[in-house]
Amino acid sequence: MSDFYPESGPAGGGFAGNAPGNVPEFSVSEISQAVKRTLEGTFERVRVRGEISGFKRAASGHLYMALKDESAVLDAVCWRGTAGRLSIKPEDGMEVIASGRITSYPGRSKYQIVIDSLELAGEGALLKLLEERRRKLAEEGLFAEERKQALPFLPQVIGVVTSPTGAVIRDILHRLADRFPRRVLVWPVLVQGEGAAEQVAAAIRGFNAFPADGGPLPRPDLLIVARGGGSLEDLWAFNEEVVVRAAAESRIPLISAVGHETDTTLIDFAADRRAPTPTAAAEIAVPVRRELLIQTGELERRLLAAASRLVAERQERVEGLGRGLVDPKRLVEEMNQRLDERAERLKGAWTTLLRDWQARLDRLQASLPHPRQFLAVRAEQLAGPAARLDYLRPRLLAERRQEIDGLNRVLESVSYKKVLQRGYAVVRGPEGAITRPEAVTPGLALELEFASGRAAATGGSGQPASASAADPTSAKKPAVRKGKKKSSSDDPQGSLL
Amino acid sequence: MADNDIPADIRKMSFEEALDELKAIVGKLEQGQGTLDSAIGDYDRGAALKRHCDAKLREAQAKIEKISLSADGSVSSEALDVE
């Protein structure tokens, strides 16, 4: 604390506080300077977390603001030279961590922090910043599909940008060894913290700067930029513009493998391919050697088989054609024979022709129709209707017969003979049917008709047997219903009806 | 067969290019197309492509190096031993 006692302290020495006369006396400037020195010496480098308020950009380019929390306020200033390098643009209400030194402003009896760097505090703020940056870089076209380069099928040399220690490089190398061992150049970098982003960017650019051939080291034909999982802040270097730009500009195809599957950093958008993990990056980078060996072995086998089959087929064809070749002398003999045969056939040709014509004439003659044939045709035409007539005639007769039979049945049903069948009889005299008793005179010849036949009778002499039930005639008389109906009302025997 | 039997144009091919051409030649020969002369030529080329592919597959080497930068910016490498 002796610093507080300026060189202009009391010449006489002694102990402070002993007496008012012994307390050193400062000028305002002196004490202000002393306070300043103390502040700057004690708080040379601090990180202060707070919310920005009252942000102002002065015409000079310096930034003025205050950092505050629930119970205190700290003025802050950021000089123009630093302001341009800040990673974030300060805004009121932003939760930040400011790094810098505490100093005082003696002219106003104020103390303040002079900001060297600003970072966002809190995940929400970081994500917001990330999204803004992503949009800005996307608008520049850094993430465009047409920028993406195809990865080589089988890279000769793989450049890996990552930490040289730890699980990530081990995972990548192990998986490469399993699938297809390759020459790997590891560019060691910090993957987190101050300077990490710059190192990663420099490594990507460094690999790209290798001459295509003739350099001390071969230029990789594939890059992997990898880092293990971590918090958003841990992975932040891979969101920095310098890294994203270096990845986007890389002419060597680049695989990004930062964090775990769920982590997405901006380098993933700029990379030609994004791997969910470092191990997956190795799998994307190289094919499996064993499978390729099997494949080429199989192709060789097919090549041999196809080629030998091709030769064998041609050999067979040549042999077949050879068998087909014949002796020319035999060919001439054969031709000779054919000539003789033709000559022979020519001789016979004329008679054959005549015979042919004769035959044709005969055929034509034979096919001339005779008038009888026309008659036959007509007769045939008639035969049809005649047959139909023959068929219809009996049917017409049968229909008529049925009609007559029907009528007859009706007639029979109303005939008096039906009544006779029930036991009645018809009495007839010489004048016909007798329907009244008075008409029966003694000795009159009568004929009685029963259902089964007729009998002769003679009229009696007595009175008409009005009441005798035994009198057969009286019993019969009323039987003829048709003729007697009208008189039966005054007939004493009408009750019998 | 020695690798120097392989024609220069094949030697410049990547593994993938050589494999694709080999597949095409095998397919063509299996269909029995072309003259005998061209078939023999195809076979020879197919065999050379296969040798080239084999050579590429034999190149499997696991050489792991770490880049180091010297003060003047030139790069060199040293073996990296990752357990």
Image (cartoon, coloured by chain):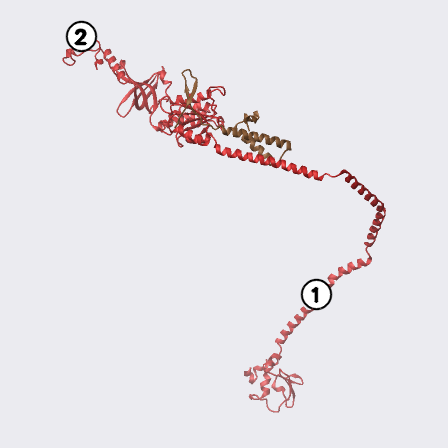
Question: Visible in this render: residue A153?
Answer: no
Residue marked by disc 2:
A11
Q: Quadrant of residue A195?
A: top left
Q: What is the x, y in percent for residue A460?
A: 62, 90
Q: What is the x, y in percent for residue A361?
A: 84, 51
Q: Residues within 10 Å of mark 2 (few under 14, many from 20)?
A: few
Q: Quadrant of residue A31?
A: top left
Residue under mark 2: which chain is it in?
A
Q: Three-letter amino acid code at disc 1? A: Leu
Q: Nearer the viewer, residue A151 or A125?
A: A151
Which mark, by number, is residue A270?
Answer: none
In percent of the image, x 74 and y 63: which residue is there? A386
Q: Which chain is brown?
A: B
In this view, the mark in front (1 or 2):
2
Q: What is the x, y in percent for residue A133?
A: 41, 25
Q: Which chain is red?
A: A
Q: Quadrant of residue A279?
A: top left
Q: Secondary structure at mark 1?
A: helix
Determine the residue located farthest toward the top in the rendered image: A11
Residue marked by disc 1:
A392
Q: Residues within 10 Å of mark 1 (few under 14, many from 20)?
A: few
A394 relative to A368 in the view: left or right: left
Mark before the other along the chain sequence, 1 or 2: 2
Q: Three-letter amino acid code at disc 2? A: Ala
User: Quick one: quadrant of the C terminus of chain A?
Assistant: bottom right
Q: Secondary structure at mark 2?
A: loop
Q: Nearer the viewer, residue A79 or A203?
A: A203
Residue under mark 1: which chain is it in?
A
In percent of the image, x 21 and y 13: which residue is there? A2
